[in-house]
Amino acid sequence: MAADAASDDRRTMVRAAASPAAEAAPAKRTRTVAVRLTDAEEAAWIDAALADGHRQLGAWVRERAVAGYLGKVRPKTGGGLSAEAAAEVAALRQQMTRVGNNLNQIAKAINAGQVPPKMAESLEKGWLEKWGQELGRMADRLDALEG
């Protein structure tokens, strides 16, 4: 009888975890699962992850596992991209992230009234305009690659 109660409790927990309310506030992931692969398998997984628009292999593996087990699939971005195009998309996104981080640091310094002299000099020389144009070019290239 205790086993039946434990089984019912587990089913309740599984249903609660699959509910929309549980998805709204995901729990922090604290568990690790290790998988051993051959070099060829790892290369194939990395290629597949890049083609699906993932830069992190672990995130791709988790998504594929959840999709297979629970039937949930993230909308595919950049589907059908070649490995080269997917790698270019990943590199562009990484570069855009770096520029965005720099912009955030500049905004924080300006808002705090603590603009270092070197930063002020870069801003006077048109750094923001230059990188604004560069971000625009990167966004155009991403649009062209991702369709």
Image: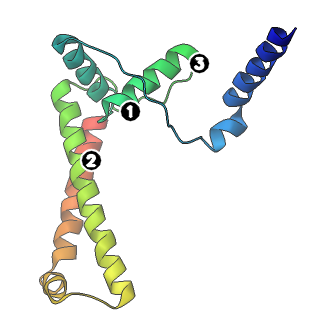
Residue found at x 79% / y 21%: 9
Residue found at x 42% / y 23%: 33
N-term mark: 2 or 1 = 1
Secondary structure at numbered mark 1: loop
Q: Is residue 92 above or below residue 112?
A: above
Crowd class of label 3 (few under 14; some 14 to 19; many from 20; radius 10 Å): few
Q: Quadrant of the C terminus?
A: top left
Query: Badge 2 is on which residue?
Result: 93
The three-letter amino acid code for the residue at tag 1 is: Thr
The three-letter amino acid code for the residue at tag 2 is: Arg
Q: Nearer the viewer, mark 2 or mark 3?
A: 3
- Number of marks drawn: 3
Q: Position of residue 56 (x, y in %)?
A: 31, 34
Query: Badge 3 is on which residue?
Result: 70
Query: Badge 1 is on which residue?
Result: 77
Pointer 2 with pointer 3, Cβ within 8 A? no
N-term mark: 2 or 3 = 3
Q: Position of residue 95 (x, y in %)?
A: 21, 53
Crowd class of label 1 (few under 14; some 14 to 19; many from 20; radius 10 Å): few
**Is residue 140 among what the camera can see?**
no
Secondary structure at numbered mark 2: helix
Q: Position of residue 62 (x, y in %)?
A: 44, 26
- Measured in 3D between alpha carbons, the distance from the residue under mark 2 to the one under mark 1, in whole angstroms, is 13 Å
Using the image as rendered, state which of residue 92 and residue 27 is in the foreground. 27
